[in-house]
Image (spheres, rainbow, N blue to C red):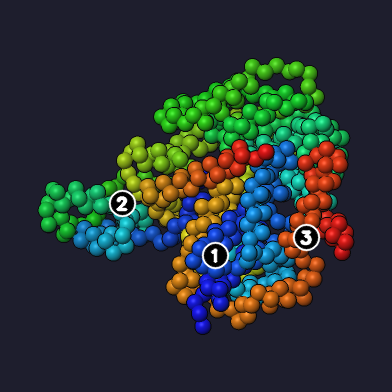
């Protein structure tokens, strides 16, 4: 029998999760010059690209252009896509072990981090992750409802996702019409009663996780005035010192922009957005129907940890505010995959440098790997996943050369295809995605929008004539 | 990026030495494991100090070969700076540079879960910057 990774015995890899990490991993595998590899990329959605399609804001089309790279990878020899196929439902980890030399999990993070405060689950309090999936047309979320009849909305968190939610809530109908936002969301948001939006960060302006372009963009919206309280825009001594010592230009610029909003006066725009800093919600209050009507927040001060990080701690000063809509946006969190060891406290797969680990035995599982947010936690931008995926793939290739991958009983490419056709006859191939993509773009052009998305699996099947 | 996010790429075993062991033990472990520092634990398993290759060099210079027989508890650095998974990697990098230390034990609650080195921090920063640059380039080059 010839060595693994040759034309006679290509290295067959299953990658579960067709977002950026999955594609970066596939790319690195398929570009190896001395290894012949074949990659099958699975996703539970019929469409690939993960959060690039379902997470990136609809008014940030340029960020989505990374899909052109993914598309080039998908068209390479040795690549196949199996969409609408769910691990644990349509195929199991054991199935994959029988058919592949190696498995890589790149399923990202689908759920949200909770605030852990009373009232968090009242009606009207939602995770930003769900709202984002909804307005981006993720088929599992299209039937969700958000009470946009409220006038006041608070977003807890000041990362890029929180800013996306604020912006989408404050955009005019005209602005939204230039995006690929889901049709039903366009209608709902155009008819919303929202007048005042609050973004709340628990630390100060110098620590806010949103990037400089994101905060600048907030000041450029057509239908919304932006405000910042002078006392909250002022940096504390620790932050000033830290900024001076690090001479971090990007953060300096970010703070300058935030402070420039202090002088803003109302200009009669329909909506207002207020950035609050050094505040944390301690409780959400509900009415007799279990709906959120208000919140209590505590003001924070910063202190330095041993290792030099500026962290918040609460003071004795509280405020109460009426509020009818609350989005928590304090981070994503990974969900466990059936059959894969999950580190509950961190929300990631148990792994050591990207090799899946059995925590009881403290040993790596041969032939199983992970990359991306489900490996290291939800942090970083799209491109951050590339060196991460490359690291995991390189360990996989080392293991291949050492002969310690899986020993599949039926590694033949046709065998797994037959199994999937039997278990999930309505799976989607990459060719199906290409057609859907063309149709979405064409529908978009007809309406002067970048694309009009299909938002249900049935719609997609119908469009393909199934 | 938080310390938590770079722990996945670490081997996860924290090598420790007991305060009653000798400098010779330390040297053997550092050489065998190819690492630069050890956490010193007391009999109850609690962190009592840290001892690094820099300490070993300092002791050899002061005592010559007899440094090897010294007891760890007597010569270790007692003032250990401790990190948590929630610490910012950039702040940690800054503190390591300013305060001139290269290893940071990470505690989650009472559990010593990792020791990160300046090398880990540099790698994480490099990967984070590479990722940002890659993303920005894609953004700028898009039509």
User: From the viewer's perspective, is residue B121 above or below residue A191?
Assistant: below
Relative placement, left or right, of A298 versus B51 is: right
Residue found 38% across the figure and 39% down from its top: B95
User: Residue under circle 2?
Assistant: B50
Q: Residue under label 1, please give it.
A: A369
| Cα distance in 3D space between marks 2 and 1 | 34 Å
Secondary structure beneath dot 2 equals strand
Residue placed most toward the observer, A351 or A443:
A443
Work out whether disc 2 and disc 1 sit on a shared chain.
no
Tag nearer the camera, 3 or 2: 3
| Residue at image point 54% right, 65% down | A369
Image coordinates of residue A345 in percent, x first then y, are 56, 57
The mark closer to the camera, 2 or 1, is 1
- For label 3, the SS is helix
Pointers 3 and 2 in contact (C-beta within 8 Å): no
Indicate the quadrant where residue A107 lies.
Answer: bottom right
């Amino acid at each position: 029998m010839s060595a693994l990774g040759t034309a006679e015995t290509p290295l067959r890899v299953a990658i579960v999760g067709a977002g950026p990490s999955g594609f970066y991993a596939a790319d690195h595998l398929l570009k190896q010059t001395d290894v012949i590899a074949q990659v099958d990329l699975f996703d539970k959605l019929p469409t690939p690209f993960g959060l690039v399609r379902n997470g990136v804001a609809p008014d940030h089309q340029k960020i989505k252009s990374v899909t052109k790279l993914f598309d080039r990878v998908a068209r390479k020899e040795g690549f196949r896509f199996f969409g609408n196929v769910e691990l644990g439902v349509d195929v199991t980890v054991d199935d994959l072990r029988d058919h592949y030399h190696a498995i890589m999990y790149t399923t990202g993070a689908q759920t949200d981090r909770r605030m852990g405060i009373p009232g968090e689950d009242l009606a009207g309090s939602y995770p930003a992750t769900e709202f984002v999936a909804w307005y981006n047309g993720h088929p599992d979320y299209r039937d969700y409802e958000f009470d946009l009849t409220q006038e006041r909305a608070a977003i807890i968190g000041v990362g890029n996702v929180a800013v996306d939610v604020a912006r989408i809530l404050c955009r005019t109908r005209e602005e939204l019409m230039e995006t690929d936002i889901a049709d039903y969301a366009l209608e709902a948001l155009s008819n919303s009663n929202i007048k005042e939006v609050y973004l709340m960060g628990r630390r100060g302006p110098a620590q806010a996780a949103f990037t400089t372009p994101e905060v600048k963009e907030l000041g450029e919206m057509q239908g919304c005035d932006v405000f910042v309280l002078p006392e909250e825009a002022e940096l504390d001594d620790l932050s000033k010192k830290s900024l001076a010592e690090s001479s971090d230009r990007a953060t300096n610029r970010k703070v300058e922009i935030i402070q420039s909003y202090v002088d803003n006066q109302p200009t009669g725009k329909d909506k207002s957005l207020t950035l609050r800093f050094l505040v944390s919600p301690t409780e959400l209050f509900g009415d007799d129907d279990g709906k959120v009507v208000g919140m209590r927040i505590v003001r924070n001060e910063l202190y330095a940890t041993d290792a030099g990080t500026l962290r918040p701690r609460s003071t004795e000063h509280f405020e109460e505010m009426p509020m009818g809509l609350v989005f928590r946006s304090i981070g994503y969190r990974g969900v466990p995959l059936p059959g894969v060891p999950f580190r509950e406290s961190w929300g990631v797969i148990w792994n050591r440098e990207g090799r899946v680990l059995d925590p009881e035995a403290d040993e790596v599982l041969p032939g199983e790997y992970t990359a991306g947010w489900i490996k290291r936690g939800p942090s970083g931008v799209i491109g951050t996943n590339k060196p991460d995926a490359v690291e995991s793939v390189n360990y996989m290739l080392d293991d291949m050369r050492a002969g310690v991958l899986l020993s599949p009983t039926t590694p033949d490419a046709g065998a797994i295809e037959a199994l999937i056709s039997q278990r999930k006859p309505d799976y989607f191939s990459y060719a199906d995605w290409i057609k859907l993509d063309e149709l979405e773009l064409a529908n978009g052009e007809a309406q002067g929008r970048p694309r009009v998305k299909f938002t249900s699996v049935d719609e997609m099947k119908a469009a393909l004539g199934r | 990026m938080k310390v938590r996010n770079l722990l996945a790429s670490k081997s996860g075993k924290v090598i420790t030495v007991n305060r009653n062991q000798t400098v010779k033990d330390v040297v053997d472990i550092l050489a065998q494991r190819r690492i630069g520092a050890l956490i010193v634990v007391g009999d109850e398993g609690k962190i009592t100090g840290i001892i690094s290759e820099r300490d070993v060099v300092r002791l050899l210079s002061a005592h010559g070969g007899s440094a090897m027989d010294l007891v760890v508890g007597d010569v270790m650095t007692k003032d250990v700076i401790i990190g948590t998974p929630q610490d910012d990697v950039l702040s940690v990098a800054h503190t390591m540079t300013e305060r001139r230390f290269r290893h940071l034990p990470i505690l989650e609650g009472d559990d010593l879960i990792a020791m990160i080195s300046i090398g880990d921090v540099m790698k994480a920063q490099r990967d984070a910057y590479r990722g940002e640059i890659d993303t920005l380039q894609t953004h700028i080059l898009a039509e």
